[in-house]
């Protein structure tokens, strides 16, 4: 690990984060762009859920995370508070692991 | 100033997510130091890079003998989605340039997801700052502890690796109320699923952005 790597990573990471916030700023965008941006959380958060639940690196892996996340889906559909959904998801996964599932 | 009731849910959830982040940060600190980074390098990385997945990837590439360039390339691919989050948050975050420069550093998965799940512009801004600050504090304290202590509990024993997708499930729900929201979500999830095995780590999430194209058609 070198300082060059640490600092160039820091610069690149910040550049990504700052681009949209500062360049677009508070300006209003064409309606079609606004409509697409409004769908970013739906598309990306769903993708993150898939990645965090059934993959490790570039492999698809089914393990104890899946029952935890399925329990979270049920709780979220029943409109449980966010904190309950998070703790339930982690607990079910922990229990499944303790029971011998990967 | 008394805390408005809406904030309490956000704060409780942010601290819970923050605590989970903290345990991963300890693991990161341990891994980074054992991959040959100094305590200072490890802490500066968490303070300045502040994108957990990228940091883990960089450390694992370096510790497995990979070149700095491949560590950099992989980490950058993983960090690129924050640019999309920045575009999205620019619609919700007000503020002058200095505020935005600070907001940029905490524009990550958790803060964007928590913010966009809120019903009003005011709550979106509050949720963004509360969640971003909580994750930032826990991530950096955890990193320091891990880098100094050199041994960590395994986050997987407590199912903490499932805490993030579980939280995201609840945060995505409000986005599924419209047909186009559901179409975008389903498309994003499927694109990620089919591209994970074939594309470099980081790219599947970017490919999943294609789900936003359901916004092209007028409602």
Image (cartoon, grey):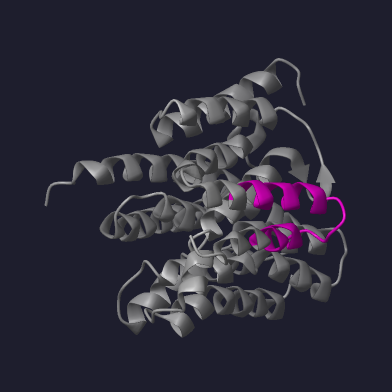
Regarding residue B216, the answer to whether it shows in the image is yes
Image quarter of residue B214: bottom right
- Residue at figure coordinates x 40%, y 41% from the top left: B13
Q: Position of residue B96 (x, y in %)?
A: 30, 81
Q: Is residue B78 left or right of residue B219?
A: right
Which contiguous range is marked in magenta?
A: B185-209
Q: Is residue B193 magenta?
A: yes
Q: Position of residue B154 (x, y in %)?
A: 66, 36
Q: Looking at the picture, does residue B169 appear above or below residue B53? A: above
Q: Looking at the picture, does residue B29 appear above or below residue A83? A: below
Q: Position of residue B141 (x, y in %)?
A: 48, 54
- Residue at figure coordinates x 62%, y 54% from the top left: B29
Residue B140 versus residue A28: which sits nearer the camera? A28
Q: Is residue A88 magenta?
A: no
Q: Residue farthest to the left?
A: B1
- Residue at figure coordinates x 44%, y 44% from the top left: B174
Q: Position of residue B59 (x, y in %)?
A: 73, 61
Main SS of residues in magenta: helix
Residue B200 versus residue B46: which sits nearer the camera? B200
């Amino acid at each position: 690990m070198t300082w060059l790597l640490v600092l160039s990573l820091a610069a690149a990471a910040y550049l990504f984060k700052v681009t949209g916030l500062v360049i677009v700023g508070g300006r209003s965008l064409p309606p079609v762009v606004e409509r697409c941006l409004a769908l970013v959380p739906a598309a990306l958060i769903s993708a993150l859920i898939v990645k965090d639940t059934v993959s490790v690196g570039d492999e698809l892996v089914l393990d104890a995370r899946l029952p935890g996340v399925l329990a979270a889906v049920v709780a979220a559909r029943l409109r449980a508070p966010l904190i309950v959904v998070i703790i339930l998801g982690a607990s079910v996964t922990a229990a499944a692991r303790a029971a011998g599932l990967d | 100033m008394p805390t408005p009731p809406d904030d309490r849910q956000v704060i409780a959830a942010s601290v819970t997510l923050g605590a989970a982040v903290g345990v991963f940060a300890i693991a990161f600190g341990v891994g980074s130091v054992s991959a040959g980074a100094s305590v200072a390098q490890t802490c500066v990385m968490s303070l300045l890079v502040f994108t957990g997945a990228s940091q883990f990837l960089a450390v694992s590439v370096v510790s497995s003998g990979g070149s700095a360039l491949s560590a950099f390339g992989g980490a950058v691919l993983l960090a690129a989605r924050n640019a999309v989050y920045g575009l999205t948050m620019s619609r919700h975050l007000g503020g002058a340039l200095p505020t935005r420069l600070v907001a940029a550093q905490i524009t990550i998965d958790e803060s964007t997801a928590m913010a966009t799940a809120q019903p009003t512009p005011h709550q979106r801004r509050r949720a963004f700052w509360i969640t971003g600050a909580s994750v930032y504090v826990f991530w950096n304290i955890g990193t320091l502890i891990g880098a100094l202590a050199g041994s960590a509990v395994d986050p997987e024993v407590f199912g903490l690796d499932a805490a993030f997708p579980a939280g995201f499930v609840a945060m995505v729900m409000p986005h599924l109320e419209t047909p186009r929201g559901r179409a975008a979500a389903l498309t994003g999830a499927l694109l990620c699923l089919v591209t994970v095995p074939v594309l470099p780590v980081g790219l599947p999430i970017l490919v999943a952005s294609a789900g936003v194209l359901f916004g092209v058609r007028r409602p």
